[in-house]
Amino acid sequence: MRHHRRFSIVQALLALSVWLALASPANAQIALEQLKLPPGFRIELVTDKVPDARGMTISPGGTLFVGSRAAGAVYAVTEPLGKQPKVHKVATGLSQPVGVAFRDGALYASSMSRIVRIDDVEARLENPPKPVVVSDRFPTETPHGWKFIAFGPDGYLYVPVGAPCNICQRDENRYANLMKMKPDGSDLQVVAKGVRNTVGFDWHPATRELWFTDNGRDWMGDDQPDDELNRAPRAGLHFGYPYCHAGSVVDPEFGKGRGCNGFEPPVAKLGAHVAALGMRFYTGKQFPAEFRNNVFIAEHGSWNRSERVGYRVKRVVLDDAGKAVRQEVFAQGWLGSGGPWGRPADVEVAPDGSLLVSDDLAGAVYRIRYAP
């Protein structure tokens, strides 16, 4: 036990040192000319004034709201598709407010153990009201405590609770799951279990089924287990953690005697340590028709792999039955020979059909559009 604790401390120190290196402004020099996309696509900078940009949502009025992690603030970008977007800070002092969601004129934001709401926010961007606590029923542990949030087709706000560790066995009704609640914070219930840490989910445009990314555990080598793209056609399914990873990798500590039978396999294995975060179905019409209903995933990039992977946006092509036909890199170039200068964190389909990408390392939001 003492040896295990010492090893955990070493891991924590390594994680901190890597995080500090990646968060250094020296690594955040934006270089759009290094980014590569498929023929006919172009990428442009919307703004580089959103420190630690993470989760995104767009209001019906066209305002882009962006959460952050280390910055502790929530931002609003007015006219994000125009020539002169303006950035407003609409909340400060929150605890890793990664997730943002908009409903009935109010902005919802995650804040570790709480969900808060900022009422009538678009009318008060210059003088935003103080956030109101909607729910404070979530765990306080910092590891995997940051939360991507989104409203589902059923009108509930979906809130994930990550595992408070790399690998551990905790109450499945409290940790390593995906939950949902009514907009007023009532009727909190578990939707999916065995989910180590999802920082991105969306609903299929046709079936309305919930899909989500999930980050695989660390310290099992460079090449396993994979991050996952999962589908939850109904509530109550279990996706394996901490017993089984990526549908086929038995955990050496907690998987003995359990195996991988009875757990939901991923729709797609995304690669080990790529850090698959935000994902969206492409529902716009600005891209060519073959991109409709494809999944776009922001890969934040590895932090403890001997050779870095990720730092890109991936496209997953599905057939009519929801089976992953193929995966391909859609946008890359944030990882240079000297290390990364950017880390994609989320994607969002804009009203005009272009694709927005947030980058927490550069504090930026980009816009990808088809312009052959």
Image (tube, rainbow, N blue to C red):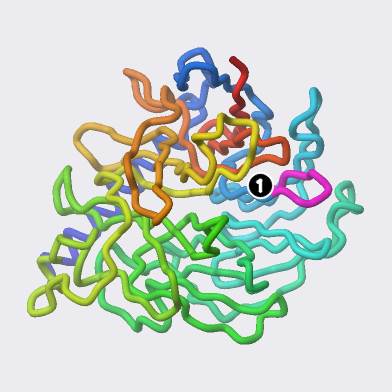
Residue at left 26%, top 43%? 304
Name the residue at the bottom extreme: 187
For residue 142, which quarter of the picture? Answer: bottom left
Residue stretch rendered in magenta on the structure: 58-65
Q: Could you say whether the residue bearing mark 1 is in a helix, strand or loop?
A: strand
- In the rendered structure, the answer to whether residue 113 lies left or right of residue 228 reads right
Circle 1 Cα neighbour tier, 10 Å, few/some/many (<14 / 14–19 / ≥20): many
Does the image show residue 173?
A: yes
Q: Position of residue 297 (x, y in %)?
A: 45, 43
- In the rendered structure, the answer to whether residue 87 lies left or right of residue 205 reads right
Foreground residue among 238 and 40: 40
Residue at left 29%, top 54%? 12
Please name the predominant secondary structure of the magenta segment in the image.
loop
Is 60 within the magenta? Answer: yes
Q: Position of residue 337 (x, y in %)?
A: 32, 18
Q: Amino acid at mark 1?
A: Val
For residue 129, which quarter of the picture? Answer: bottom right
For residue 273, which quarter of the picture? Answer: top left
Residue at left 44%, top 35%? 313
